[in-house]
Image (cartoon, rainbow, N blue to C red):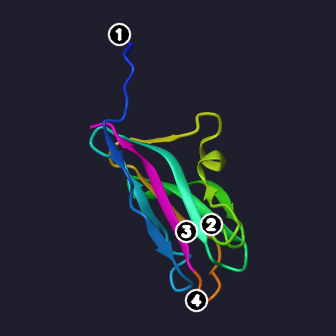
């Protein structure tokens, strides 16, 4: 079988499944992106938080009912608020490539390692494109 020698690009922009975490559900894994029929490319994952404590955000790939831990992203105090820049999780998760590719049926999930401060929120927004 010959190798594919033609470049393939995402066809449809995808915002993924933006999620907000609070102290009530922070240790529960939430799906933020799912691989489309022909796969999905995730180019950035913006994270903002108004918490007054650092948050360790854990990321997982959900494959056939099993969640595989792929990395931890530290979310700084007040990331994306006041004069603090938002956090892009991608450099922590993808290494040199700068993006993640989700095959069809694979989910990208995240959860906080510990419960957040009461009355504070963390928002996670994945951005990329679907190949189909």
Q: Earlier in the sequence, mark 3 or mark 4?
A: 3
| Residue drawn where x is 58% and y is 38% of the image | 98
Label 3–label 2 contact, CB within 8 A = no
Residue tagged by mark 2?
A: 80
The quadrant of the rendering that contains the C terminus is top left
Residue tagged by mark 3?
A: 111
Please state the extent of the stretch shown in magenta in the rendering: 121-132
Q: Earlier in the sequence, mark 1 or mark 2?
A: 1
| Residue drawn where x is 64% and y is 46% of the image | 91
Closest to the observer, 11 or 70: 11
Instruction: Judge the density around disc 2: few (<14), some (14-19), many (≥20) Cα neighbours within 10 Å.
Output: some
Q: Which structural element holds mark 4? A: loop
Label 4–label 2 contact, CB within 8 A = no
Q: Earlier in the sequence, mark 3 or mark 2?
A: 2
- Tell me the CA gap for discs 4 and 1: 56 Å
Instruction: Judge the density around disc 4: few (<14), some (14-19), many (≥20) Cα neighbours within 10 Å.
Output: few
Main SS of the magenta part reads strand
Q: Earlier in the sequence, mark 4 or mark 2?
A: 2
Q: Which structural element holds mark 3? A: strand
* 3 or 2: mark nearer the eye: 2
Q: Is residue 52 left or right of residue 86?
A: right
Q: Position of residue 11 (x, y in %)?
A: 31, 36
Label 1–label 2 contact, CB within 8 A = no
All told, the count of numbered labels is 4
Residue tagged by mark 4?
A: 119
Q: Earlier in the sequence, mark 3 or mark 1?
A: 1
Q: Which structural element holds mark 2? A: loop
- Tell me the CA gap for discs 1 and 2: 47 Å
């Amino acid at each position: 079988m010959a190798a594919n020698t033609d470049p393939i690009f995402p066809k449809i922009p995808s915002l993924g499944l933006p999620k907000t975490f609070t102290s009530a559900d922070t240790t529960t894994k939430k799906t933020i992106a799912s691989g489309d029929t022909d796969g999905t490319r995730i180019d950035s994952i913006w994270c903002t938080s108004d918490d007054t404590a650092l948050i360790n955000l854990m990321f997982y790939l959900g494959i056939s009912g099993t969640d595989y831990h792929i990395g931890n992203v530290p979310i700084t105090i007040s990331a994306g608020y006041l004069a603090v820049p938002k956090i892009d999780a991608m450099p922590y998760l993808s290494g040199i490539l700068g993006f993640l590719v989700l095959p069809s049926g694979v989910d990208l999930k995240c959860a906080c390692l510990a419960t957040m401060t009461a009355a504070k929120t963390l928002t996670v927004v994945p951005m990329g494109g679907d190949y189909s």
